[in-house]
Image (spheres, helix red, strand yellow):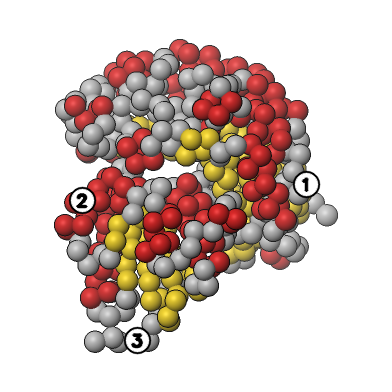
Amino acid sequence: MKTKTLKKNKINVVTLGCSKNIVDSEILMAQLKANNFEVEHESMDDDAEIVIINTCGFIDNAKQESIDTIIRYAEAKAEGLVDKVYVTGCLSERYKDDLEKEIPEVDAFFGTRDLPRLLKTLKADYKHELVGERLLTTPNHFAYFKIAEGCDRPCSFCAIPLMRGKNISTPIEDLLTQANGLAAKGVKELMLIAQDLTYYGLDLYKKRALADLINRLADVNGIDWIRLHYAFPSGFPMEVLDVMRERENVCNYLDMPLQHGSTKILQAMRRGTTREKTEELIAQIREKVPGIALRTTLIAGYPGETEADFQEMYDWVERSRFDRLGIFTYSHEENTHAYNFEDDVPAKVKKERADLIMELQSGISYDLNQLKVGNNYKVLFDRAEGDYFIGRTEFDSPEVDNEVLVKKADGFVRLGDFATVNITSADHYDLYGKLVL
């Protein structure tokens, strides 16, 4: 028996996982709205007739969160709190048959490229004229900007090609149309994302076209910051750095997941590079763009990783002094190349190694932040919280990087606007400052 009244034609979209999933949900929501559905993103009211869960299937923790969320809404359906539950995204693409058996309460499962079929199930039309249109779930002044789908890289640990397929670049002209549309809505910052930015254009133009794309996007009126996420080190197109240096609205920021600092492990991971080549690339990047902020992501506990391999990575991180760094513990994923190997590093050891790297990085981050004290920075303000306005410099991406805190008592800033801030103090991951009036 239903315990509350559900709103007919109201859909709650729940997004799990990465920024690529956020973009997919925003596109889905725009299509639903155009079909006269009332759409909410991650509503806490639980009064929607339909729930669509966009899942992540990347690593164990993400898969578990997706499964827990599906079960939560399956139970809500059993209690009459929801009429229909649909599941889409990476987990659904990868484990559809298993999920259908294990959670039969779900009305239908869809893969990562099944948007037209999902809409048809909802008796909605796929509106081709809306291609590129999105309902933003981020603050209105920044947006994730997906330039390609899928990945052609053979990394041994990664299941993304199983879930997202081969690389398909979006044509430059289509991306310019999208960027102009976002700028017209007040978006000031585009965060370029793909499974691999540096592969962009090879399928369409038979060359790496990322530099061409960035140059064209930098001409879009109203876009003040362009930020690059998820670049691959092997075959990195160095001309991108020329564009970064020459174009004022391309942030001096590069997110390049490097995964490890041991040549032996990098080769086992099928990354197509060595530690020595990686160090040379980092030096070239810093030489071409002085002051660039480098973010990377690493993996601890890959099969066969010895104490010596880990020490090699630790020493490399200590030398490299990355501005930003995150680290995952290795997750043994079915149907990947690495699944053929024994997952021989105990979970406890994986975590200990990851913690040691983060402790090291915390100290590096603290030292680098102290160098910013006394300097002025252009800051984009994202939100207000407690006694502070909170923003970011060009060297920081939302949610994963440092933040700049300015006391509300010291002056007013409008969220979504830029202001100049003098940094007065800093800790490991936050900067504190005063507005320069």
- Amino acid carrying label 2: it is Asp
Res 386 → quadrant: bottom right
Q: Position of residue 304 (x, y in %)?
A: 23, 22
Which residue does the numbered mark 2 point to in the structure image? 97
Residue depicted at x 37% and y 15%: 263
Q: Looking at the picture, how far across and down is residue 394, in whole percent?
A: 66, 41
Q: Nearer the viewer, residue 147 or 332?
A: 147
Q: Residue at x 51, y 38 (%)?
A: 148
From the viewer's perspective, is 318 left or right of 215? left
Q: Could you tell me which secondary element the residue under label 2 belongs to?
A: helix
Mark 3 — residue? 4
Say if 288 sits above or below 426 in the image. Answer: above
- Of 434 and 179, nearer the camera is 179
Query: What amino acid does circle 3 point to?
Result: Lys
Q: Quadrant of the N terminus?
A: bottom left
How far is mark 1 from mark 2, CA to CA? Answer: 47 Å
Residue at (71% x, 35% y) in the render: 216
Determine whether, in the image, residue 65 is placed left or right of residue 182.
Answer: left
1 or 2: tag closer to the N-terminus: 2
Q: Is residue 132 above or below residue 158?
A: below
- Residue 345 appears in the picture as rendered: no
Quadrant (top left/top right/bottom left/bottom right) for the C terminus = bottom right
Provide the residue designation for mark 1.
221
| Separation (CA) of disc 1 from disc 3 | 48 Å
Residue at 45% across / 33% down in the picture? 167
- Dot in front, 2 or 3: 2
Query: Dot 3, crowdedness within 10 Å: few (<14), some or many (≥20)?
Result: few
